[in-house]
Structures are given as C-alpha cells and as structure tokens.
Amino acid sequence: MQEETRLTVTSPLMPDLDEFHEMLQEIWKSRWITNNGTFHRQLEKELASYLKVPYLSLFTNGTLPLITAFQALRITGEVITTPYSFVATTHSLWWNGIKPVFVDIEESSCNMDPSMIEAAITPKTTAILPVHCYGFPCDVDAIKSIADKYGLKVIYDGAHAFGVEKNGDSVLNAGDLSTLSFHATKVYNTIEGGAIVMHDKETKKRIDYLKNFGFAGETEVVAPGINSKMDEIRSVYGILNLRLVDSAIASRRRVAERYRAVLKNVEGISLFEKFPGIKYNYSYFPIMVDSEKFGKTRDRLYEEMKEKNIYGRRYFYPLITHFSTYRSLESAKIDNLPNANRLANSVLCLPLHHSLSDNDVERVLSFFEKR
C-alpha cells in the first residue's frame, strides 16, 4: 500500500458526549423542545456560515424541504427532472400535483443533461428539478441559461451536495432554491433532518411559515403549510456534528483516494472523472462495472460482496421511471433515457464512511484483485 493513500481512521467520529449532555440539560431547563428554539436558530446560523449561503431554513427530514420548495414558489403544471435519483425527488412533485417530465442524464456525471431540457419544455412547464448526484455539481450555468430563456424556476435537489463548491462558491447558491438532506447516511447528519437554502429574507419568512402549518403569528395562518420543523435535540446533535464534518470529509477523501489508486488499473471498472475547481465532499464512491471486461455483472459483484458482509449500493436501481407510479408517463420510456438506464444497471457505490479502517478498505478491494 502506498503511504500517501494509507488510511489512518480507526474509530468513528463522535460528538463530545459530555457537551451533548450539558446542552440537553439546557433544553430541559428552558422547557423549549421545538418551534424555533435557541439551538435551532444557532444551527441555522452556523450552517449558513459553513455552507457560504445567505439564508437557510431547517426541516425535520430531507423530503419535506422538496415538497415545501414547490409550495413556496407556487409551482404547478409540469417540471422537468431526472430519473436517476432517490424516489423522494419525484415524490415531492407528486405530492404537489405536479407532473414530472423526465430527461436523460450525462454519462460523465450522472446529472441531468442540459442539452435534453429544451426539447422537453411545453406550455405547461414551470420549473426544472436537477439533482447534484453523488455530490457531482450539475452544469448550473447551462441550466440557468435555459431557465432564464423560458422563464422557468430552478429548484436543486442538493441532498448529496453538502459543502460542495465550484470555484469557491457553494453549488447550493445556484437556482431559486436548493434543498439538503441531513439523514444519518449523509456526510453531515442530524440523524434525520434537512434544509432549504434561499437567497432573501422574504422567501425564508414564507418557508418558515410553511413548515409550521402556515402560522404567521399566534392567530393567523397565511398558507396551508405542513409540520416539518426540526426539534431542539436534533439541532444540538447537528451543532456538535458540524464541528466534526471537516474531519469526516478528510477521512472519506483518504478512503476514496485509496479506492481510486487501485481501481483505475482494473479492467472492466470505470471511475468518474474529477474536475478542476470542484471542492468535493466524497459522499459516495460510484464505480461502473462492464460485465464483459470485468468478468461478472454488477449484480453478481454486489451479491458476492454482500455474502461477505460488505454492503455496496446499486444506487440508483431501479430507476424512478421503472416504478409503477411513474412508468406509464411518456417521458419514462426506456428509449428516451438510454444513459440513465445503462448507468442504473452498471453503477455500484462502494462502502464509504469516515470510520472505515485500512482493513475494511482492503477487504472491499480484494474483490477486484486479478483473477
């Protein structure tokens, strides 16, 4: 093993339990458990600063920010989106009575292909919903150009994009709104949680109303909002986790570099290119498996790893367009989405976590040794 890619992680990063206990005691003493409490406000402020965004509103999970984003912008009709994502992306449209229109993805990034967007626009199109897949930034400039040309809103699903920057600017500043997930599987988590990033105070005020049933005061309801507030306990967890996230990302990077150093020389395994000017968060390490050259299918590799208690993810498989809720749509036809279908059948995300040891990583890599 080359020294420059050797891992040093031996135990999970964990918040200071004594400080966590002290902060919990403050909550009990204040008797303020939820509804925009002290720690909730503190976490919003600290996250906005860390992520280099002007305003941020916390939510109780990563799906409700998507649903609320479309309510906040009063989106209706049709929205152009990607089939290559977690189902929550498209479910957020369904819950708002919006028709998803799927376009294909770029093979190089797994992100929405901007060249496919204009052909999908109809008189009913009101917005575009791209996803920064695996934390790889979308072509935000090309998407903005199309959106401006046709007067469309852009909402980014940034569930994978915590801390990702392009030329020093957060990708979360792109579009009209961006959403985040703080689920326990993410680079940064509050166990369950999420957020919306916005550009101005007025939009934040409206979103803050919407996530609290639409209340704009004790007796006034201004919109049919939902209950999606983050509580004080998870806010405390988030504050402490934020102090550790840079260390977690650094640990993930070392794992990713070890994977890349070995797998770049394995026939039948393709890696996604790293582009200059991008600050990655190493949230995932996807590989593409060519069954003819590698000697086994992606699914066979997945099953063999699982038999040894090594759990990768066929991420995203099946495509959203293969699920019964969406497969009857014209835009969901396989012929319309060749890249998305090909990648769904060939991509495997390898285990990637800040607590993976040298031995863990070498166990994963043993499946790629010359046979």
Image (cartoon, rainbow, N blue to C red):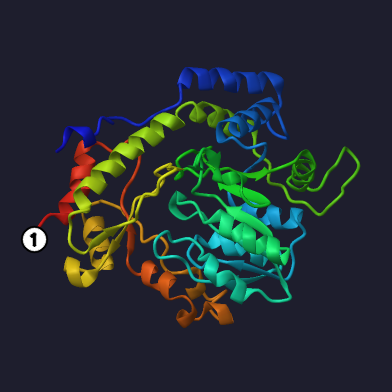
Image quadrant in which you'd find residue 343: bottom left
Rendered location of residue 137, percent (x, y): 49, 51
Q: Quadrant of the N terminus?
A: top left
Rendered location of residue 54, percent (x, y): 67, 36
Taking the image as drawn, is residue 16 in sight?
yes
Camera-nearest residue between 140 and 134 = 140
Image position of 365 with respect to 2: above or below:
below
Rendered location of residue 166, percent (x, y): 50, 44
Amino acid type of disc 1?
Arg
- Seen as rendered, the residue at the extreme right is 219
At a point 51% along the width and 30% down the height, the residue shown is 242
Rendered location of residue 42, percent (x, y): 65, 26
Is 25 left, or right, of 248 in this rendering? right
Camera-nearest residue between 35 and 10 = 10
Image quadrant in which you'd find residue 125: bottom right
Image position of 291 with respect to 315: above or below:
below
At a point 56% along the width and 36% down the height, the residue shown is 51
Is 316 left, or right, of 328 in this rendering? left
Residue at label 1?
371
